[in-house]
Amino acid sequence: MDSNGQHFIIDAKECQAEILNDAKLLEKLLTKVVSDLGMEILNTHFHSFLPHGVTGAIILSTSHYSIHTWPEHRYAALDLYTCGNQELWPVLEELLNEMKAGSAFVYELSRGHESKNQPAIKDLIFTYDGSKKKDSERTVELRDDRGNAYDSIQLKELVEGQHNILYHGSSQFQDITLVEANDLRLYLDQELQFSSLDERHYHEALVFPAMEMASEHERVLILGGGDGLALREVLKYPNVKHVDLVDIDPQVIGLAKTNPKLITQNNRSLLDERVNIHFEDAKKFILRELQPYDVIIIDFPDPVDQVISSLYTIELFSQTAKILSKQGVLVCQSNSPEDTPTVFWSIGKTINMAGLNTLEYNVIVPSFGLWGFHLASHFKLPKIIPSISVQHQALTSDMSNLFTIPTSIKEVRGKAVMNSLKNLKLHKLYKNEIEKW
């Protein structure tokens, strides 16, 4: 029997909630798809949940077809895998129309022993006024209410300059744009996350000091970092046995696991068998019953709003301290000490108030300027910094120069405040300082 086949994984968004909550109607719609494709059904089962939601599966002689719905979010996840080479997309597109999907994110993979397993990715927008659907990969619409002024201008120039837009779409959390110019760049909500020209300066500085100071490396926790770049550096250490990577946005991780350019950049780190990926809010994940971690890496975005500010709180740092081993080391990206010095010191103060010893450091990342971090541990961190023991490109083996903070930045330390869920201040400080630039 021929093992080659096709696999479609679809995130259908902005669907009609009533349709997503009707198990009988969904069974009828999916059965019609199978019938139109001429496939043989072996068994079906659809189940309704209270108060809302449906899960359903159709077992085919050639494989399977499944759906899971969240009517309250107007979202459905579909999965169709079948042997053979018949054209599947037209009938799947019709199903999305029947579900009144406003948009859909589609992975199309070839499967089987001859497959090269390089997925095609579609990000589609549908209209229902008689006009033709649009493929949002062809048009990038930039919004005035997203990103900082500098990054937005830069992204607009890239888009208008006919550069290669590898991906553009929106998840329920953020806008996502992956663009290739003379480098590879990822933008989230129109803010630059990395440039392939110099991202190693940031990610090596984020990872290596903590890994070198920790006594063990067996268990590592990464909060954020869905692009897999910090993970790439962690996996250079041969005694790493288990990594939990927690990121709230499955669409970012899906892109980092499937886009060939991004896979090359992160060195397939997200596909490593030692890595366990959790699509979850970091605040919830750390409340689980967890074994202690030797290294914890916090790579959250800048605290541009109240939601992200709620991640940099004494409550979160206190909980991470509980799951950090006695000889373990935590590191937290802490924004630019040059552009937002009060934010930088306030993150350090909040970590310190959570009961951990802290040590600040910084690095120059050409795309961003001076960037800051805080190490933290249950023990007093040594002043003698170990050398890098694994392969590295951006940093020198001697990392001691990272721990020299400019005098002008030290002078702002006294203005630091503690950030807590009861009194969120970090996003306000960030806005005040960033507007000065």
Image: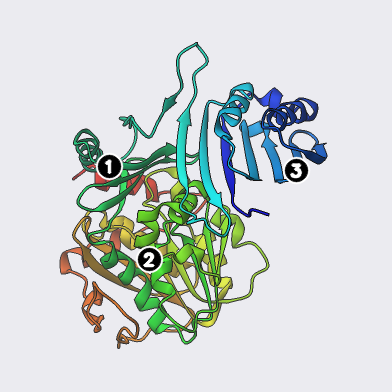
What residue is rendered at 58% in x and 56% in y? Answer: 112
Select label 2 or label 3 by which is in front. Answer: 3
Residue under label 3, please give it. 60
Answer whether labels 2 and 3 touch (C-beta < 8 Å).
no
Residue 395 lies in what quarter of the image?
A: bottom left
Q: Earlier in the sequence, mark 1 or mark 2?
A: 1
Looking at the image, residue 405 lies above or below residue 1: below
Q: In this figure, which residue is indicated by the disc labeled 1?
A: 164
> If you read the primary sequence from the N terminus, does the residue marked by circle 2 or circle 3 appear first?
3
Residue 251 position (above or below residue 115): above
In which quadrant of the rendered view does residue 298 lie? Answer: bottom left
The residue most toward the top is: 130
The colour scheme is rainbow
User: How far apart are the two marked residues, 1 and 2, measured between alpha carbons?
Assistant: 39 Å
Instruction: Specify the label residue 348 is tagged with.
Output: 2
Is disc 1 in contact with disc 3, using a CB cutoff of under 8 Å?
no
Measured Cα–Cα span from mark 1 to mark 3: 39 Å
**Front residue (pair 47, 61):** 61
Q: Position of residue 153 (x, y in %)?
A: 21, 37
Which circle's residue, 1 or 3, is located before the other in the chain?
3
Could you tell me residue 62's position as x and y percent? 71, 46
User: SS for tag 2?
Assistant: helix
Instruction: Please state, as top left, top right, bottom left or bottom right, where the C terminus lies in the image.
Output: top left
Q: Is residue 285 above or below residue 149?
A: below
**Cβ atoms under marks 1 and 2 closer than 8 Å:** no
Residue 18 in percent (x, y) is at 70, 23
The residue lying at 68 percent from left, 68 percent from top is: 289
- What element does badge 3 sit on? strand
